[in-house]
Image: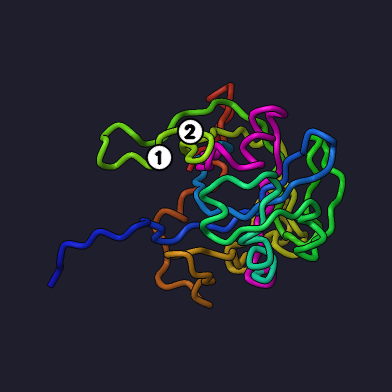
Amino acid sequence: MHTTTEPSILYFGTPVVLITTRNEDGTTNVAPMSSSWFLGWGCMIGLNSGSQTTLNLLRERECVLNLPSVEQAYAPNRLARLTGRYPLTADKVAMGYRYEKDKLGAAGLTDMRSDVVKPPRIVECPIQLEAVVQATHRFGGFEPERAYNTGTSDDPLVLAVELKILRVHAEESLLVPGKKNHIDPDKWKPLLMSFAQYYGLAPDRIVPSRLAEIPEEMYRPYEDMSKRPIA
């Protein structure tokens, strides 16, 4: 039997991301988030426009999406109610946040140089995605009764930020042997968030996937379509 319900959030399960950006003074800001989805080498993320991460992204136009595994669940928990923006906005105060300049240190994380963007990668995260901003979109507010907020400084609106992934770094142990461009889904154990709680994947595949029978290279964009592999 189904019943009508109105959850406050619809977080049915998405990957946790630790996003690194550069502050105005050149220092690093890191923040946990889970409003993200990927299509090819593009990624859409949802952010509160009043956060330090969003301010940095709009100014610098680049970031790194660091994907923790279940082994790094401690990190987003340590960052969960810290903010790099001062003074705090009213919504952050109401939710018990506090200001922290050195969020990397507070989370026990180590930075490392990126290849093509200025924000650093996080050593502890098994997958790191260097990215640049393609576009930003106001999100929500089309119907007054479902508007997230008013867009004021104390109650900022939500932005959807479209990113282009420029470079992917993965721990070698996650790759399929003999295939340097293929991450083994049996080895990659992403940290997931479902209704604000942390989870991991089931230990084994549930059923064989017919979709996985299509060669992964078929999804790669090719300027010359004649070079696309034939299934």
Residue at 57% from the left image edge and 39% from the top image edge:
50
Tell me the quarter of the picture where residue 126 sits.
bottom right
Looking at the rendered structure, the kind of residue marked 2 is Thr
Count residues near mark 2 (Cα–Cα under 10 Å), then give few for <14, some for 14-19, many for 20+: few
Q: Between residue 118 and residue 211, name the one nearer to us.
A: 118
- Residue 38 in the image: x percent, y percent? 52, 44
- Residue 101 in the image: x percent, y percent? 78, 51
Q: Give the side of residue 107 with respect to residue 200, left or right.
A: right
* Dot in front, 2 or 1: 2
Tell me the quarter of the picture where residue 176 sits.
bottom right
| Residue 139 inside the magenta-drawn segment | no
Looking at the rendered structure, the kind of residue marked 1 is Asn
Tell me the quarter of the picture where residue 149 sits.
top left
In what element is the residue under mark 1?
Answer: loop
How did the renderer colour the structure?
rainbow
- Say whether marks 2 and 1 touch (CB < 8 Å): yes
Q: Give the side of residue 101 with respect to residue 129, left or right.
A: right
State the residue position of label 1: 149
Residue 19 visible: yes
Considering every residue shown, the one lying at the far left of the view is: 1
| Residue 58 inside the magenta-drawn segment | yes
State which region is magenta. Answer: 43-72
Count residues near mark 1 (Cα–Cα under 10 Å), then give few for <14, some for 14-19, many for 20+: some
In three-dimensional space, the C-alpha distance between marks 2 and 1, rounded to whole angstroms, equals 8 Å
For residue 161, above or below residue 18: above
Residue 152 circle label: 2
In what element is the residue under mark 2?
Answer: loop
Residue at 84% from the left image edge and 53% from the top image edge:
111
- Residue 53 in the image: x percent, y percent? 65, 42
For residue 43, above or below residue 3: above
Residue 219 visible: no
Q: Give the side of residue 88 with respect to residue 205, left or right.
A: right
